[in-house]
Amino acid sequence: MHAVKATIKDGNVTLEQPVDIKGPVEAIVIVLDPDPWSALITDPRPRPGLSKASNEALEEFLSGQTLPLEPDNLT
């Protein structure tokens, strides 16, 4: 197994260093997203499950069914 730094642009993978492997070979590509939260927040696609969960959480909060978070007691 080898780990090689690469860049992906327009669906094309460019290796940043030479690899001495005779091919073809199978590869697994792991894409490092620099800021996944930004992409999720700005994505305009509807998320019915997330909307339902957030509305339920807001209803619980507004009706007094929640407790303050105590970071020292998290398990």
Image (spheres, grey):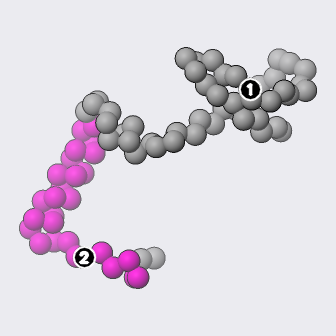
Tell me the amino acid under the disc marked 1. Answer: Leu
Please provide percent x and percent y for residue 61. 15, 66
- Find residue 15 and name its label: 1
* Chain part drawn in magenta: 47-73
Please provide percent x and percent y for residue 34. 51, 42
Q: Residue at x 24, y 38 (%)?
A: 48
In the image, farthest residue toward the front = 16
Q: Is most of the magenta stretch helix, strand or loop? A: helix
**Hey, which quadrant is residue 58 in on the image?**
bottom left
Q: Is residue 27 visible?
A: no
Up the image or down, 65 lies above or below 6; here it is: below
The residue that disc 2 covers is 68
Q: Is residue 74 visible?
A: yes
Q: Residue 70 vs residue 28: left or right?
A: left
Mark 1: secondary structure: strand
Q: Nearer the viewer, mark 1 or mark 2?
A: 1
Q: Nearer the viewer, residue 23 or 38?
A: 38
Q: Earlier in the sequence, mark 1 or mark 2?
A: 1
**Hey, which quadrant is residue 24 in on the image?**
top right
Q: Residue at x 80, y 30 (%)?
A: 17
Q: Nearer the viewer, residue 70 or 63?
A: 70
In the image, farthest residue toward the bottom = 72
Neighbours of disc 2 within 10 Å: few (<14), some (14-19), many (20+) = few
Q: CA distance from mark 1 to mark 2?
A: 49 Å
Tell me the amino acid under the disc marked 2. Answer: Pro
Q: Nearer the viewer, residue 66 or 36?
A: 36
